[in-house]
């Protein structure tokens, strides 16, 4: 019996070495807060120089769930205000639970358009209640050039949407 157990353990260890990159799949990750209003919309406004990337990020999320993120208007008050800061740190942007997204110009200006798009889409994801997830996701904790939603991003959005 000990030989069988030892063999199984050795097989599992060998299997994990022979199949690199085969990590457990990520799951839906959501936060305890969102910026979505009672009508299930996240209305944005602001004076950020990156608002065009916010619009593109909204289009990315809205392609999956139509019309949730939209520009604020006279009829739809702003749920999130986007602005810019200049800080000497490694942070590209931050979404706050009180309805603010701040972009750090010192880091954002160094990014190409895909990088800026990733950051804006990612920050809107936080506003939708999404948490950080796997490296193949828009919601990865570090900035990438990923601009399309992964299966994990969509599963997280589905889970978050149920909480609105």
Image (cartoon, rainbow, N blue to C red):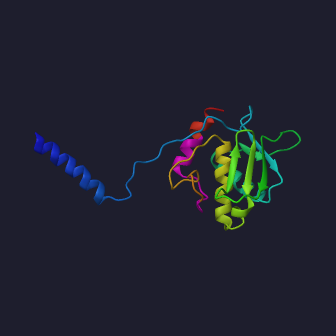
Can residue 60 be seen in the rendering of this structure?
Answer: no
Please indicate whether residue 157 sits to the left or right of residue 40 in the image: left
Looking at the image, is 48 positioned above or below residue 40? below
Q: Residue at x 60, y 38 (%)?
A: 31
Classify the position of the N terminus by image quarter.
top left
Please indicate whether residue 79 sits to the left or right of residue 64 in the image: right
How many numbered circles does the render carry?
A: 0
Q: Quadrant of residue 19?
A: bottom left
Can residue 61 be seen in the rendering of this structure?
Answer: yes
Q: Quadrant of residue 68?
A: top right
Q: Nearer the viewer, residue 64 or 48?
A: 48
Query: Magenta span covers which residues?
Result: 144-157
Whole-percent x and y of residue 46? Answer: 82, 50
Check residue 44 for magenta coloring: no
Farthest residue, direction right? 74
Q: Residue at x 21, y 51 (%)?
A: 11
Q: Quadrant of residue 32?
A: top right
Check residue 146 for magenta coloring: yes
Looking at the image, is 114 positioned above or below residue 57? below
Farthest residue, direction front? 88
Please indicate whether residue 77 sits to the left or right of residue 98 in the image: right
Whole-percent x and y of residue 5? Answer: 16, 42
């Amino acid at each position: 019996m000990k030989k069988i157990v030892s063999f199984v353990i050795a097989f599992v260890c060998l299997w994990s070495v022979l199949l690199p990159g085969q990590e457990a799949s990520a799951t839906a990750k959501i936060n305890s807060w969102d910026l979505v209003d009672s009508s299930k919309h996240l209305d944005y406004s602001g004076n950020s120089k990156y608002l065009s990337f916010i619009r593109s990020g909204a289009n990315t999320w809205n392609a999956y769930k139509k019309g949730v993120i939209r520009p604020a208007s006279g009829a739809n008050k702003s749920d999130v205000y986007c602005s810019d800061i200049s800080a000497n740190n490694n942070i590209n942007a931050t979404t706050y639970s009180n309805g603010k997204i701040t972009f750090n110009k010192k880091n954002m200006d160094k990014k190409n358009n895909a990088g800026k798009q990733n950051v804006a889409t990612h920050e809107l994801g936080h506003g939708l209640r999404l948490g950080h997830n796997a490296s193949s996701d828009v919601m990865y904790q570090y900035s990438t050039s990923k601009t399309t939603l992964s299966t994990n991003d969509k599963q997280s959005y589905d889970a978050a949407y149920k909480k609105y």
